[in-house]
Amino acid sequence: MLVERGNRCLLRLNLLLNRLPKDIKAGTMKSMQKDMKEWVENWKRVGPILEQILAEELRAPDYEQGLGEFLPMLDWACMHAQPRETSGLVEQQRLFMKMWEHAGVKKS
């Protein structure tokens, strides 16, 4: 996946370079092509390694770190929460009726 992104970026850069004036293109083209080739080669080498690291992180998440990031958000939500007077079902039914009316369905 990461290698595909690298190849797409390389294609975009080539398209942009083709739009440059010829005098700029002559000197720039060779050095940029060399840089782009090195960049693509690096991604071909590093891309699979990064994908493997990502897969390992997804298979074995660090719950302690995640909890450390989640708890402040939960604390903020609890501090700023406003008590509700209803469950929201009446509002939900009102929105459903509005949706049905918009769709042209007749009430039974």
Image (tube, grey):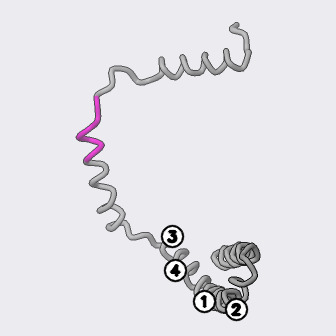
Q: Which residue is mark 3?
A: 58
How much space separates mark 2 and mark 3, taking CA atoms? Answer: 41 Å
How much space separates mark 4 and mark 3, taking CA atoms? Answer: 9 Å
Around disc 4, counting alpha carbons within 10 Å, would you say few (fewer than 14), some (14 to 19), or many (20 or more)? Answer: few
Amino acid of disc 3: Leu
Asked if residue 77 is positioned above or below residue 101 in the image, the reply reads below
Q: Which residue is mark 1?
A: 42
Q: Quadrant of residue 100?
A: top right
How much space separates mark 2 and mark 4, taking CA atoms? Answer: 34 Å
Which SS does the magenta portion mostly show?
helix
User: For numbered disc 2, what is the local secondary structure?
Assistant: helix
How much space separates mark 2 and mark 1, taking CA atoms? Answer: 18 Å
The residue stretch that appears in magenta: 76-82
**x then y, percent, for residue 89:** 48, 21
Q: Which residue is mark 2?
A: 30
Q: Which residue is mark 4?
A: 53
Circle nearer the N terminus (2, 3): 2
How much space separates mark 1 and mark 3, taking CA atoms? Answer: 24 Å
Amino acid of disc 2: Lys
